[in-house]
């Protein structure tokens, strides 16, 4: 088969006889090895213009033979036989203007049966399309969709907005479910756990369900396990779990929960692996000594691919910034012209961040960056630019593993780790590779390997609340005693030794069980001597922040959690700066001044120091100020309230300060706009136009119906974000 594919790629025009022979060979493969036939067909379709068009009716039959019905419509091919017409009509979606391929149709039939469904399929399978198909049926009144990132949830929200006549879309815990129509909860696992008074849930969908695993070192696995287990036990809903490249799950889970584990290797996209590593092994294996050598190999490759969209995998946000800036210098040295000075985000960055930020120069030469540290509206914009070919190159972290949909033709597997030390395993590699090519966009993607391909090990996803090997205290505390397996009884006994009222409080907070116990005991011991540091409301003093964040830092971090380069002193300082100035720009300026005084930065020009200050500040904002610190404040707030009440003392209330930080100091009824990827600058301007009494669900409707985005107070970028959301 590979010889046939090589012939197709190397030939400019394929005559009638050769076309017929290749189609005949493909027909035989369908009987012998359908997966190989699919691969050959995808390569034929990618080179369709080379083949004899008079035999298109045969090609249509071949596509129909492997069940790739969407490609019949995409290529405008004609089906001639009545049987084939009937089968094609059968694969037409009942609710969407789309044709499903055979495996999608089968999977949908499983979802519509009495079974729960767990599916493992390649990235190019089109698993998430079935989420919309399910919603469009209106079969389920209340649906929860859990996805691992806010960016993914926002992408899903944009796809499902068209069903707001049937479902209320709920993206925040402050929203009240509707009683007039169904509810579609688009939430992270943490928000499911925080949601009070959920209505009866009929269906729960978990995207990227491998994040349940306790063995994949994901700090948010506990939250996902607790959310899934809670919804299952409370409502007994149907469930649909979807993820890529998984071989099996915890033994016995499907039997207990009346589920089917369905694994398919069907892929409507072919990904070709290109080995860069072997030729340069002696240099690549010495990354410090030959750093520039490896970079130049990458940059030369990117130039050769400049007419296609390429993603470069990097291990961390710092690596994203470094490699993209080195590539920028490389292009400047080669006198590549700037072509992108008119992108709408450029004006916004100059006004709201800094005219010195290197992202401006990157974008001008069609380079983008994408990682977990950037603000959501920026990452969404950059992905949009990439998918509309306004930028050609995207330097990414593992965010690309987690389902960000792009139109990338090529993936460059450049770094071999996640973060500084965790090696990329075969599962991660497969997910990175799966981003090359895209269903209904590119038939063929390519992955360029700058590292050895990890060893192919079977991927078994454990479900800790069920398998319990291993199981964390934070998941175990949420199980009934009868659910706990014998091997974990000793671990359970330690939890059960906690007084019931303390255990209930700790369970509700959902973080480090015995870390919380230590905080309870510490506050009890120090309540009288440090009452002024414990019982505060509104804005804390620096001493109060030092005390509370110190308790959190010393007790709520997971044992192996990476915090570098953050320190407790720095966290207190940045929280105070941000809390009192209420602006990321003050944090950037403060960080810039701090970096200027460090020896390691003394040889750098101001623009590079500013770049580091922006990167550091965004990382702090996203991971610490919008996620960790508010959660910690919430946990310790509940503990100090508990201890103060039992001692007959007035408790403090950290909620006001915690909410302000988490929500970027945006007015309560407008916070929902940040979930929609609207920049804070635009939201603050809306505070002068939209009443504080307007319900949050009505805000976007008012913006659209009254065309508030046409107001001259908005710059073009803000206007486009408001208009197109």
Image (tube, grey):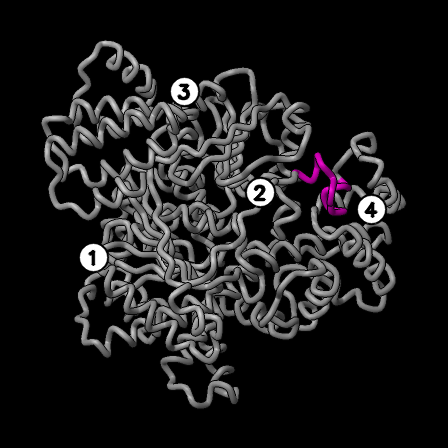
Residue 307: mark = 1
Q: CA distance from mark 3 to mark 1?
A: 41 Å
* Number of marks in picture: 4
Indicate yes or no whether the magenta region holds residue 476: yes
Residue drawn 66% across the image and 23% down it:
255
Residue pointed to by mark 3: 137
Q: Residues within 10 Å of mark 1 (few under 14, many from 20)?
A: few
Label whose residue precedes the other's in the sequence (1 or 4) = 1
Q: Residues within 10 Å of mark 4 (few under 14, many from 20)?
A: some
In the displayed image of the protein, which residue is found farthest to the top?
A: 82
Residue 502: mark = 4
Q: CB atoms at circles 2 and 1 under 8 Å apart?
A: no
* Foreground: disc 2 or disc 4: 2
Q: Residues within 10 Å of mark 3 (few under 14, many from 20)?
A: few
Residue pointed to by mark 2: 459
Q: CA distance from mark 2 to mark 1?
A: 36 Å
User: Which type of secondary structure does the marked residue at label 3 adopt?
Assistant: helix
Q: 75 and 229: which one is in front?
A: 75
Can you see residue 492?
yes
User: Which type of secondary structure does the marked residue at label 2 adopt?
Assistant: loop
Residue drawn 20% across the image and 64% down it:
340
Q: Which residues are drawn in magenta?
A: 463-477
* Foreground: disc 3 or disc 2: 2
- On the image, the x and y values in percent for residue 174 come to 54, 41
Whether 543 is drawn above or below 88: the answer is below
């Amino acid at each position: 088969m590979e010889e046939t594919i090589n012939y197709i790629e190397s030939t400019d025009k394929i005559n009638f006889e050769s076309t017929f022979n290749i189609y005949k060979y493909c027909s035989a493969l369908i009987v012998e090895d359908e997966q190989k036939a699919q691969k050959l067909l995808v390569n034929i379709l990618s080179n369709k213009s080379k083949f004899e068009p008079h035999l298109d009716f045969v090609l249509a039959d071949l596509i129909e033979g492997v069940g790739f019905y969407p490609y019949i419509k995409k290529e405008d091919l004609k089906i001639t036989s009545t049987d084939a017409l009937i089968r094609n009509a059968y694969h037409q979606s009942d609710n969407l203007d789309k044709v499903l391929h055979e495996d999608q149709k089968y999977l949908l039939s499983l979802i519509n049966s009495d079974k729960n469904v767990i599916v493992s399929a390649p990235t190019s399978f089109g698993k998430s399309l079935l989420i919309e198909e399910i919603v469009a049926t209106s079969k389920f009144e209340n649906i929860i969709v859990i996805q691992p990132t806010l960016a993914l949830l926002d992408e899903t929200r944009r796809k499902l907005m068209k069903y707001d006549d049937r479902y209320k879309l709920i993206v925040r815990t402050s929203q009240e479910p509707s009683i007039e129509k169904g509810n579609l909860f688009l939430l992270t696992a943490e928000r499911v756990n925080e949601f009070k008074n959920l209505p009866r849930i009929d269906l729960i969908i978990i995207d990227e369900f491998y994040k349940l695993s306790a063995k994949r070192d994901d700090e948010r696995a506990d939250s996902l396990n607790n959310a899934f287990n809670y919804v299952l036990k409370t409502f007994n809903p149907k469930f649909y779990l979807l993820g890529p490249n998984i071989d099996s799950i915890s033994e016995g889970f499907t039997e207990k929960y009346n589920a089917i584990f369905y694994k398919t290797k069907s892929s409507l996209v072919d990904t070709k692996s290109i080995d860069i590593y072997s030729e340069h092994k002696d240099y690549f294996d010495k990354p410090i000594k030959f750093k520039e050598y490896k970079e130049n190999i990458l940059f030369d490759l990117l130039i050769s691919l400049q007419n296609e969209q390429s993603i470069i995998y990097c291990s961390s946000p710092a690596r994203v910034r470094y490699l993209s800036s080195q590539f920028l210098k490389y292009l400047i040295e080669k006198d590549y012209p700037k072509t992108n000075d008119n992108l709408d985000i450029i004006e916004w960055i100059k006004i709201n961040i800094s005219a010195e930020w290197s992202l401006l120069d990157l974008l001008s030469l069609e380079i983008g960056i994408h990682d977990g540290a950037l603000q959501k509206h920026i990452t969404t914009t950059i992905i949009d630019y990439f998918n509309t070919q306004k930028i050609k190159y995207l330097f990414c972290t593992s965010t690309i593993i987690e389902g960000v949909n792009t139109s990338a033709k090529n993936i460059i597997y450049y770094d071999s780790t996640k973060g500084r030390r965790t090696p990329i395993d075969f599962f991660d590699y497969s997910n990175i590779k799966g981003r090359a090519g895209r269903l209904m966009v590119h038939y063929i993607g390519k992955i360029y390997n700058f590292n050895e391909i990890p060893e192919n090990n079977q991927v078994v996803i454990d479900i800790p609340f069920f398998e319990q090997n291993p199981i964390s205290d934070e998941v175990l505390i949420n199980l009934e005693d009868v659910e706990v397996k014998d091997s974990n009884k000793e671990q359970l006994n330690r939890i059960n030794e906690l007084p019931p009222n303390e255990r209930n409080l700790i369970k509700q907070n959902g973080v480090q069980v015995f870390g919380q116990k230590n905080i309870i005991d510490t506050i009890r011991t120090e309540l009288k001597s440090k009452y002024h540091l414990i019982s505060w409301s509104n804005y804390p003093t620096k001493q109060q922040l030092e005390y509370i964040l110190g308790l959190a830092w010393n007790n709520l971090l997971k044992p192996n959690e990476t915090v570098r380069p953050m320190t407790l002193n720095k966290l207190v300082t940045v929280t105070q700066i941000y809390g009192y100035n209420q602006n990321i720009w003050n944090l950037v300026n403060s960080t810039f001044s701090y970096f200027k005084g460090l020896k390691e930065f003394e040889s750098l020009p101001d623009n590079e120091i500013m770049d580091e200050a922006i990167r550091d500040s965004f990382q702090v904002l996203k991971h610490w100020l919008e996620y960790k610190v508010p959660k910690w404040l919430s946990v310790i707030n509940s503990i100090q309230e508990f201890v103060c009440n039992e001692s007959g003392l007035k408790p403090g209330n950290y909620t006001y300060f915690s909410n302000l930080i988490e929500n970027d100091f945006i007015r309560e009824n407008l916070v929902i706009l940040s979930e929609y990827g609207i920049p804070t600058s635009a939201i603050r301007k809306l505070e002068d136009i939209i009443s504080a009494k307007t319900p949050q669900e009505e805000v976007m409707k008012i913006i659209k119906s009254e065309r508030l985005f046409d107001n001259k107070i908005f710059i073009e970028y803000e206007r486009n974000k408001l208009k197109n959301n």
